[in-house]
Structure formats: structure tokens, C-alpha cells
Image: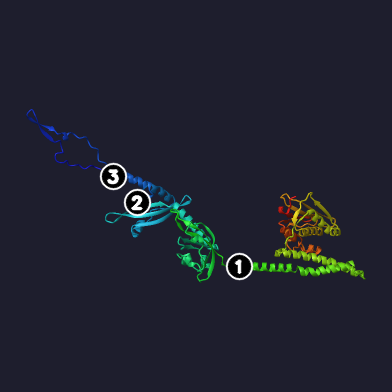
Amino acid sequence: MARAARTPPPGRGRQAEKAVSVGGKREKRPRSADKPKPETAAAFDLEPLIAQVQGALLDTADPLYVVDPKGRVLYGNAAYQKVREVFSQAQADPVLPGLFEATEKLGGLLEREIAVEFEGRTRFFAATHKLLRDVAGNSQALLCVFTPIDEAKRTQAALALSDERFSDIARLVSDLVWEVDRNLAITYISPRVMDVLGYHPRELLGVSLSDLKAPDSDLPPALGAPGPHAPFDNGKIELLDKAGATVIFRLSGLPVYSRDSGELLGFRGTAQDVTSLLAHEAALFEAVDAAEAANRAKSEFLANMSHELRTPLNAIIGFSDVINEEHFGTIGNPRYKSYVGDILVSARHLLTLINDILDVAKIEAGKLKLEEAAIEPAELCHQALRLVKDRAARAGVALACDLAGDLPRLRIDPRKVTQILLNLLSNAIKFTPRGGRVELAAARRADGGFGFRVRDNGIGIAPEDQPTALAPFGQVDSQLSRRFDGTGLGLPLSRALANLHGGDLELESTHGQGTTVTITLPKKRVLKD
């Protein structure tokens, strides 16, 4: 830029002169202010500098170009030149015909999105077109700026996919998906609400949960509490549907906080319609209570019938025994004596079965009590073996006894423990073929308790049949039921009697090889020497 000439002020264009007297003569001497000044620096020219700065800014900005009304590119920055290469290779022209006129019709501003397929992928740009006018308002050129939005488009696509996925899940799940603000006003509710409450989701936006709940229902404490807030599960709430009927829900949710301020924004979660479920549960509880009441009534009836059932059987057994022994004279016909013997055996067998049934009934009714005493376990074992000796001889089964030395005394109910041993020995003899062996053993256990063990090499029980064998009245096989008499109460009754002592019954069996049954008693049943 040329510097304009400056007109010096008066007396300043040249050195001012001052008259002085030298030797009576006046001479002109330059004043001190009129001494020659050093040459000043040239004035700074800003226009080239501004142009350079503007060029640098444009070259580092988003792709930008300027076109005239005829579509000719007047200017394009460095970023535009790179984009122009992409457009040319993709055979797409960013300067569309009629772009100037289209921008003019829209008031001087046109925004559009451009997608370009380049090197096997799609590039996205947001194009902004703005008219440049002169001072008279006439359109002179069109400024176009391209902003790459690849990342934004990917984010937008990911958000759209996430929204679509959430929408699909919210429609498909059976539970309601809901969201409320901090005042419990509904901000979102899934379309499932139409099925359970009869409302369209838009009808409930802005409605408070407090306005939807039934009059006698309360909000879950987690929603009504002032804080601190935590996730909650299975909060019960009763809401009214569009027809006014009560629907019971179980709410699960969690608080939502602002990421910036940490302020509570509201809650979101799910709601499960449990109206039918609770009705079914109530009906089931009633049925279970009725069944338990009937079972208790049955057990109490059998327990109360013990005297009535045993009295006539005792009379039959007693008189049959008198006749069989011919206490009051001989029986004329030998056949009668044989019949009386059969009556006596059958009556005793029937009494044994009835006693087992009544004992089970008493245990179920909670009426069977222990009569404890200090007992030598060896005596119980020998007594049990004596009682089954004849039965084993008739079956052709050998009996053995294996008692550890120095057995401790036990505090138990001797009659009930003897009944356990008799049940186990009788079962072992019954299910052991002729020529087999049954062994009764007793010893301390490693845990300080005590154990009785009955082992046989009989037919055994398959693993899948063992639960049936331990169930009351369980018969493992119908063919066995026909071959061997009994009620199926031996093992379950023995386990129940062991449980009364605080112990248990352990069953180990292999089909075709034999069975081992162990009765365990706790340490407290063992008396110190």
C-alpha cells in the first residue's frame, strides 16, 4: 500500500532559523529543535497480513468454496481441494446445477446432507450454502461449507439401532417398562400398558403414579422415600385400569441421576402384573391347607383308633392261643387245631401291620413320644436277633452279629430302637434268597455318635427305586409286592423313629448284590463311661 504524502505544519517543513549576534552581526543558527531527525520506520501495511491470516484459517477449516451465479468455482480452500478429489473419484459433483437459484428461493440459506460412496465406504457431509450479497443487496456469489459428519452419522445410527432394540424388547417382554421423573410423573411407559391397564401410552405421559394407584394402596417405600435412593425389587403397588378395576403389580427399578450434577432425575424399571399369580397362589395355599388338614384328620383318626383296633385283635390272639395250646381240653378234630394255628399266625401278623400303620399315623400327628432309658446296645442287638431267628431259619438265611468291643451305653427308647432293628432284619431276611446271609453290627462312629448296621446279600434295590422304598407305603415293584407280603412301611418307619432320636437312616444298595442300611444316632445319645 502506498503511503500518502503528509503536509508539514507551518514552521516544521524545514529547519527554522534563529538570528544570533556574532561580532556585532546577526547570524542565522539552527535551533536545537531544528536539528536533523533520524529517519522513522515505515508505516505497517495490514492488508497482506490479514489476507495471509484469513487464508491460513480457511485452509485449516472445514472444506469451503465460493461459486458465482453461473456455478463457476471462484475459490476453494485446501480442505475443499481434498474433498473435491473424493467427489471426483466418486463421480459426484458437489456444485449442483441450480444450486445458486435454489438458495436464492430459500432466502439465501440452504442446508443439505450429502452421502458419497468412496473406496468401499460411505462418507457423509453436511453442506451449508449461503448467498453473498453486495451493499445493494444483489447476490454476487454463493459460499458453500462442507462439514464431515461421518462420526455423527455413526453415532446417530448406533442410537437409532439402540432405540429400535429397546423398543422391540419393550414391546415383546411381558412386563411393563416404565420411567418417571423425580415427582413420579410418567415420562415413558411401554406399549404393554394397553394390554394390562387399557391406556394408550400417550394417555399416561405426565400422569403421576399417585393418581393411578388404588385408594387403599401405597407406593413402594423406595419411590416415596426422600433419599438416599437405591435400586429396589418386588415393590408391591395396586393400580386402577381404565375401567376402574384393580391390577396388582410388582415394581422393580433403580434411581436415575444426572451425569453432570448428580441430581436425582427420577426412576426407571419394570412392572410385572401379578394379579392372576397372586390369585393362583392364594388358591394353592387354600388347597394345601385343606390337604394338610385332611391329612392331619386322617392321622389323628388312625392314632385314636389304636385302642379300638388292638382290643379285638388281642382277644382273637389270646383265645386262639388258648385253644391252640388246648388249656381246657383236647380238640376233637385235628383239622380244627390246624385252623386255630392259622388264625393265631394271621392275627399276630395283622397286629404287626396295624401297629406299623398306627405308629406312622402317630408320628405324622406328632403324638408319638419317646420313653428314654440308659440301655446297653449289645442287649438290644441280641434280643432282635433272637426274635427273628426262627424266621431266618425257615427262609434258609444265615444270621451273623458283629459288635465292637466295649460298646458305650445309649440313652434311647429301647422299644422303638428294637422295633427299628426288627424292621430292618425282617426286610433283609425277606429279600435275601435261601442260602444268603444277614449281618447285624453296632459300633461308635467317627463323629462321636453311634450306628447300627444291617447288611444282606439279597436282591438289592436299584438307585432309581430307592426313593420309592423310603416313601411310606412304597412298593418298589408290583411283582415283588405279590411275592413278598408287607405294607412298605419298614424303611420309612425306621427312618421316622431314628429321626425322633435326632438321628437318620442311610441306605446303600446295588441291584442284585445286596443292601446295607445304617441307623445313625447323634453324639448326645452316647453316655459317657
> Which mark is first along the chain, 1 or 3?
3
Q: Which mark is residue 66?
A: 2
Element under label 2?
strand
Query: Disc 2 vs disc 1: Cβ atoms closer than 8 Å?
Result: no
> Which mark is first along the chain, 2 or 3?
3
Amino acid, disc 3: Glu
Q: Nearer the viewer, mark 3 or mark 2?
A: 3
Please give left or right for residue 514 compared with residue 332 in the image.
Answer: left
Mark 1 lies on residue: 282
Q: Residue furthest bottom?
A: 243
Tell me, yes or no, if residue 306 can be seen here.
yes
Quarter holding the N terminus? top left
Q: Nearer the viewer, mark 3 or mark 1?
A: 1
Please give left or right for residue 48 compared with residue 233 in the image.
Answer: left
- Examine the image and state in which quarter residue 395 appears: bottom right
- CA distance separating discs 3 and 1: 91 Å
Place of residue 192 in the rendered image (x, y in percent of width and height, measured from the top left): 52, 65
State the residue in front, 56 or 252.
Answer: 252
State the residue in front, 209 or 206.
Answer: 209
- CA distance separating discs 3 and 2: 21 Å
Place of residue 488 in the rendered image (x, y in percent of width and height, measured from the top left): 76, 63
Place of residue 99 in the rendered image (x, y in percent of width and height, measured from the top left): 36, 56
Q: Nearer the viewer, mark 2 or mark 1?
A: 1
Q: Residue furthest top?
A: 23
